[in-house]
Amino acid sequence: MVLVLIAAAAGLTAAPAPATQGAFAVELSTKLALGQGFILEEEEAIAALTRIGIRPDDGWAADGPATRDFVRQIQKSMHQLLEKVSREMNAPLPPSLEAPPRP
């Protein structure tokens, strides 16, 4: 306890825990309005994102950490979804989106 107080007084606090994939899915589904005005629970958000093709390479792990690699995989799947819609609508991608994100 004393060490915690000394660390806090010195401005040394523990780094916040990284977001979970489930929390990330809730936030992303909210931003994309997949809940039609409602905030989805983790499993609902994961299911909604998966239905439209947004998912990490190895699938979602609600309690897993939202690591840099995880976010890159989500970015890649969102890019693939954008390409699919672009093709279906015969709408060209802007040059900045023509090349997929680097691994």
Image (tube, rainbow, N blue to C red):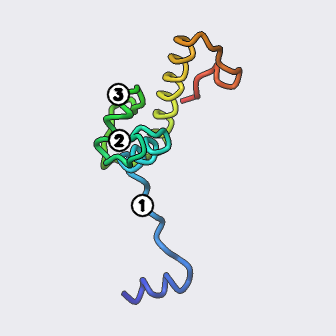
44 up-or-down from 17: above or below: above
Which SS class for mark 2? helix
Which of marks 3 and 2 precedes in the sequence? 2
Query: Which kind of residue does numbered mark 2 sit on?
Result: Ala
Q: Which residue is found at the position 42% from the left and 47% from the top?
A: 24
Who's the residue at 41% across and 40% down the image?
Answer: 36
Which residue in the protein does label 1 denote?
A: 17
Mark 1: secondary structure? loop
Q: Position of residue 20 (x, y in %)?
A: 38, 51
Q: Which residue was labeled with disc 3?
A: 51
Query: Is the residue under label 3 in contact with that under label 2 (CB below 8 Å)?
Result: no
Q: Which of pointers 2 and 1 lies earlier in the amino acid sequence?
A: 1
The residue under label 3 is which amino acid type?
A: Arg
Disc 2 versus disc 1: nearer the observer: 2
Mark 3 residue crowding within 10 angstroms, few (<14) / some (14–19) / many (20+): few
Do the CB atoms of the residues marked 1 and 3 lie less than 8 Å apart?
no
User: Would you place residue 21 above or below residue 90 in this image?
Assistant: below
The residue lying at 49 percent from left, 82 percent from top is 7
Residue extending furthest front?
A: 37
- Image x and y of residue 10, in percent: 56, 83
Quarter in which the N terminus is drawn: bottom left
Q: Which residue is mark 2?
A: 45
- Identify the mark nearer the N-term, 1 or 3: 1
| Amino acid type, residue under disc 1 in the picture | Ala
Q: Residue at x 45, y 87 (%)?
A: 5
Disc 3 element: helix
Q: CA distance from mark 2 to mark 3?
A: 10 Å
Q: How far across and how far down the image is residue 22, in percent?
A: 35, 47
**Dot 1, how many residues are within 10 Å of its Cα: few (below 14), some (14-19), or many (20+)?**
few
Does residue 101 appear left or right of residue 27 in this picture? right
Depth order, front residue of 62/93: 93
CA distance for labels 2 and 1: 21 Å
